[in-house]
Image (cartoon, helix red, strand yellow):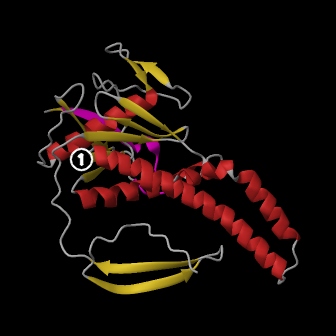
Amino acid sequence: MPFYQSSRKLNKPSGYLNVTVSLDTSGKYLASILTEIEGENPAVSTEGKVIGIDLGLTHFAITSDGSKVSKYDNPRYLTKHEKNLKRQQQKLAKKQKGSNSRNQAKKLVAKVYERVSKSRQDFLQHKLSRKLVNENQVVVVENLNVKGMVRNHNLAKAISDVGWGTFTNFLAYKLEIKGGKLVEIDRWFPSSKLCSNCDYQADKLPLDVREWTCPNCGTRHDRDGNAATNIRNEGIRMLQTDGTAVSEERRGSKTKAWTQVRSEAFPHDVRSPHYNRFDLVWVVHTC
């Protein structure tokens, strides 16, 4: 008898458009049902809690609602299954090509990858993203260049395993269904170097510096918590600049707005492989 498992509850669909049956590499059949549901998603509203999220590797997500900072550890699912995966791949390599035993070994390798994928999806989709969307109306994240970041061979495996892009996509569609809003700030915004209390910007802040003290106001900052607060502040500023009503205020100085300025000395486009990281500067304008 076939096993049935639903990934989403169907709320009174008005009609079934089509059903797609597929066979995955682990030998399981999956049925994808496309339905048509009456009604529309609620209108987008920004009246409610606003949270900023700083994504990382040691901690998967660091969140700030302006007063409280929370940290969510990176589960590192691929690392946990790495030994088992290596063992199964070694067994596969010893099997004769075209044999039934090799086909069975392929399925065992595929099952390990499937376990990693589903564990990651469960953490990102059904737990963390759902929790954040339920508790907040506006979620602010950085627009990370994941494809460019994986070119760093020392961090490529860790970045691919963490699933930042998938997490952002889950937040986007859940917020759309709820009537919330996902705000993506510029990837070059200096969230870590900026003091969330007085807007002072540090010249340099190496990655190994996890805490720093603002020389202007004397505030002691946790690097990631400070970044999450700045991301939240920048998201609120962007909404207010667009004329969107926001019920919550920015933390720290409310008289300054950060604007990205291109230096004429560097003609390269931001997305160009010849882009120089000193091409962009951040200046402050008084409102």
On screen, residue 262 versus residue 4, left or right, reads: left
Q: In this view, does 62 lie above or below 47?
A: above
| Placement of 166 over or under 210, stated as above or below | below
Q: Specify start and end residues of the magenta stretch as a single range.
A: 268-285
151 in magenta = no
- Please state which of residues 246 and 71 is positioned toward the viewer in this rendering: 71
Closest to the observer, 26 or 265: 26
- Location of the N terminus (image quadrant): bottom right
The residue where tag 1 is placed is 137
Does residue 185 appear in this view?
A: no
Is residue 253 rendered to the left or right of residue 75? left
Q: Residue furthest bottom?
A: 18
Q: Position of residue 144 (x, y in %)?
A: 43, 50
Where residue 111 appears, as percent x and y from the top left, is 67, 66
Q: Nearer the viewer, residue 194 or 261?
A: 194
Q: Is mark 1 on a helix, strand or loop?
A: loop
Q: Which residue is drawn at 41% across and 22% down?
A: 221
What is the quadrant of residue 219 in the picture?
Answer: top left
Q: Is residue 56 left or right of residue 68?
A: right
- Residue 67, percent across and down? 29, 27
Residue 220: x and y, percent?
40, 17
Q: Which of 225 and 20 is in front in this view?
A: 20
Residue ranking furthest to the top: 218
At 44% from the left edge and 32% from the top edge, which residue is drawn? 224
Dot 1 alpha-carbon crowd within 10 angstroms: few under 14, some 14 to 19, many 20 or more? many
Q: Is residue 178 left or right of residue 89?
A: left
Q: Is residue 35 above or below residue 236?
A: below
Residue drawn at (37%, 45%) of the image: 265
Residue 180 appears anywhere in the view: yes
Let me know if residue 272 is in the magenta part: yes
Amino acid beneath label 1: Gln
Looking at the rendering, in which quadrant would you find the C terminus?
A: top left
